[in-house]
């Protein structure tokens, strides 16, 4: 009974970590206008900040192939948090633009490891009903995403953007101190809940084999296009409201509306819908595509805020559903089942923010944001194909 209680306490630490991670990931979308002004760069260049973050995310795959299975996940998670703190502190020094790109790539490496291991540990410690547990974990991330833009905008009212990044690093510092104390105190109890098979290593050959199955490819492509929509909104929707609609005060609220809908979807809507994960993803992303286009056509702040909210409400559960599916298909290698779908997300974040920024520079920011609607439509298309393919396999 005591072991179960302590395990639940550790899970609460993971949930709070995802809440904190959700807040910190909103820094770029909230502070992007201030960073553009500080460095005197164009939108396409600013999109590189997000791209370099996700290049780092992509590099994390190879880091995990080396260390997953060699180092206990609980310890590896703690070490990654420490290095994430160091990366945030480097950004807070406002180095030259070429250097800050490298700093954002470090943020990407260690952030991806944190995200992957948190998901993998939840799947290992709560193997019953993985999709529901993943939705809960990502619901806390959504809460962070909801609070992040508003909290950081408030901080940015009295602090400059570098001081905001430093404040975030200090919040992580307090967290890792508590995390380290708890793990040291309850190490024996936690270690017994992590059987050797859940620490199984995976290598480059496993990564190659992942793309040898049709359903894996369809899952990967679905995540790629869903993340394309999410990345465009997360990076540019605040700037769209500030510059196109000329109402800066509503920029953070438009971004928060997406995360409000996402949180509600992950915690309440998706777990209570009795349907297959691919079908939920298909219907949700189809609605998102329509909502984005309708919001842009409205040309108003209420229209775009409502569109952001609908995007979250309809497709917000896509990531936890996709990750849960990956873990269910690979129960003996949950880190592998997590990182492979996430690799599509990382690759998407490398491609879409600068592509959207480039389109915005040449055609105007409404066209750049509309690219997110197109991406959502493609996510709906491929998840629909996946759903049909799985039904065919079952038959």
Image (cartoon, helix red, strand yellow):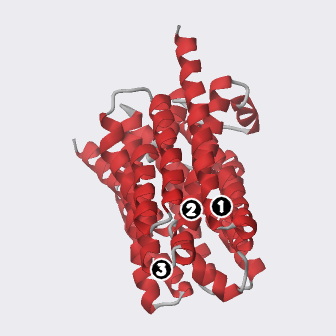
Residue 390's x, y, as percent? 55, 19
- As drawn, the label of residue 212 is none
> Where is 182 relative to 38, above or below?
above
The residue at the far bottom in this view is 158
> Where is 118 relative to 216, above or below?
below
Residue denoted by label 2: 80
The residue at the far top in this view is 395
Given contact means CB atoms under 8 Å apart, are the residues at marks 3 and 2 in contact? Answer: no
Residue denoted by label 3: 248
State how far apart marks 1 and 3 are (Cα).
19 Å
Residue 363's x, y, as percent? 72, 65
- At horizontal 52% and vertical 16% (from top left) the residue drawn is 391
Given contact means CB atoms under 8 Å apart, are the residues at marks 1 and 2 in contact? Answer: no
Residue denoted by label 1: 368
Q: Is residue 239 left or right of residue 126?
A: right
Label 1 crowd bin: few (<14), some (14–19), many (20+), radius 10 Å: many
Q: Earlier in the sequence, mark 1 or mark 3?
A: 3
């Amino acid at each position: 009974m005591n072991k179960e209680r302590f395990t639940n306490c550790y899970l609460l630490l993971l949930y709070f970590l995802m809440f904190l991670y959700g807040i910190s990931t909103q820094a770029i979308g909230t502070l992007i206008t201030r960073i553009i002004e500080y460095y005197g760069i164009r939108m396409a260049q600013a999109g590189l900040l997000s791209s370099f973050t996700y290049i780092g995310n992509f590099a994390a795959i190879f880091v995990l192939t080396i260390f997953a299975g060699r180092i206990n996940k609980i310890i590896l998670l703690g070490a990654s948090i420490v290095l994430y703190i160091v990366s945030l502190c480097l950004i807070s020094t406002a180095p030259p633009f070429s250097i800050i790109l490298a700093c954002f790539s470090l943020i990407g490496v260690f952030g991806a490891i944190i995200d992957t291991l948190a998901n993998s540990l939840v799947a290992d410690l709560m193997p019953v009903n993985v999709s529901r547990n993943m939705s809960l974990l990502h619901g806390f991330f959504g809460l962070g995403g909801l609070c992040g833009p508003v909290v950081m905008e408030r901080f940015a009212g009295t602090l400059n953007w570098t001081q905001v990044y430093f404040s975030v690093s200090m919040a992580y510092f307090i967290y890792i101190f508590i995390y380290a104390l708890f793990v040291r105190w309850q190490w024996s109890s936690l270690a017994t809940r992590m059987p050797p098979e859940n620490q199984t290593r995976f290598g480059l050959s496993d990564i190659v084999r992942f793309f040898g199955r049709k359903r894996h490819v369809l899952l990967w492509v679905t995540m790629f296009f869903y993340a394309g929509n999410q990345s465009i909104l997360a990076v540019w929707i605040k700037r769209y409201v500030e510059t196109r609609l000329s109402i800066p005060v509503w920029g953070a609220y438009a971004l928060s509306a997406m995360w409000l809908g996402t949180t509600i979807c992950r915690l309440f809507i998706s777990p209570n819908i009795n349907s297959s994960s691919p079908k939920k993803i298909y219907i949700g992303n189809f609605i998102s595509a329509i909502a984005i286009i309708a919001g842009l056509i409205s040309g108003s702040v209420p229209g775009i805020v409502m569109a952001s909210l609908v995007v979250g409400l309809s497709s917000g559960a896509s990531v936890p559903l996709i990750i849960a599916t990956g873990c269910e298909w690979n129960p003996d290698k949950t880190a592998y089942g997590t990182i492979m779908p996430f690799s599509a997300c990382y690759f998407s974040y490398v491609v879409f923010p600068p592509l959207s920024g480039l389109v915005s520079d040449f055609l105007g920011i409404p066209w750049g944001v509309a690219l997110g609607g197109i991406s959502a439509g493609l996510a709906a298309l491929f998840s629909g194909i996946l759903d049909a393919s799985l039904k065919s396999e079952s038959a």
